[in-house]
Image (cartoon, rainbow, N blue to C red):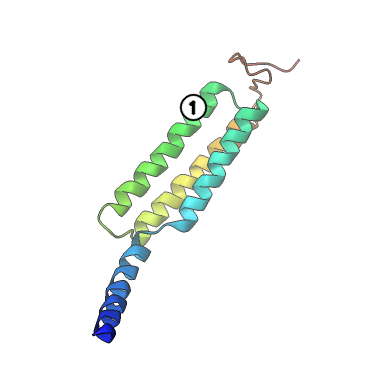
Amino acid sequence: MKMKLAFAAMIATAATLPVLAQTATPHIDQREQRQEQRIQQGEQSGSLTNKEAARLEQGQAHIDRMESKAAADGTVTHKERARMRQAERVQSRHIEKQKHDRQHDYNHNGVTDHRR
């Protein structure tokens, strides 16, 4: 009896693992986390203004929605993964551009500081 239960548990586990693997997006999630950290670091250092950070956060939310939609049917296809990776590349360029433009908020008062 114990043997039958153990065998049934192994079959159930083996049947669910491929489904979990098809919806998992670990590389996309890791990159998304790193981009969130870059935005937070930019806010703390003052290299991003409040408006820039809010706009970049909206871009991150867009990628989250893309990921949710892709996983909704239980499978994230190669094409969906490629679209998300492209969206992350675009978002990364936006973060880089905004962090290194000449708009700064070094004193964190919400007013853009200009270099003199």
Q: Position of residue 17 (x, y in %)?
A: 34, 69
Residue furthest out toward the front: 1
Q: Is residue 86 left or right of residue 102?
A: left
Q: Is residue 39 left or right of residue 116?
A: left
Q: How many numbered marks does the figure carry?
A: 1
Residue at 60% from the left image edge and 27% from the top image edge: 48
Position of the C terminus by quadrant:
top right
Q: Position of residue 80 (x, y in %)?
A: 35, 55
Q: Secondary structure at mark 1?
A: helix
Q: Position of residue 74 (x, y in %)?
A: 27, 58
Position of the N terminus by quadrant:
bottom left
Residue at 64% from the left image edge and 20% from the top image edge: 105
Residue that mark 1 sits on: 54
Q: Quadrant of residue 2?
A: bottom left
Give the residue type at disc 1. Answer: Ala
Residue at 25% from the left image edge and 55% from the top image edge: 73
Q: Nearer the viewer, residue 23 or 86?
A: 23
Q: Is residue 36 left or right of residue 46?
A: left
Residue at 37% from the left image edge and 61% from the top image edge: 78
Quick check: 52 above or below 110? below
Quick check: 109 above or below 13? above
Q: Nearer the viewer, residue 115 or 7?
A: 7
Quick check: 115 above or below 87? above
Tell me the crowding category of disc 1: few under 14, some 14 to 19, or many 20 or more residues within 10 angstroms, Cα based.
some
Q: Position of residue 53 (x, y in %)?
A: 53, 28
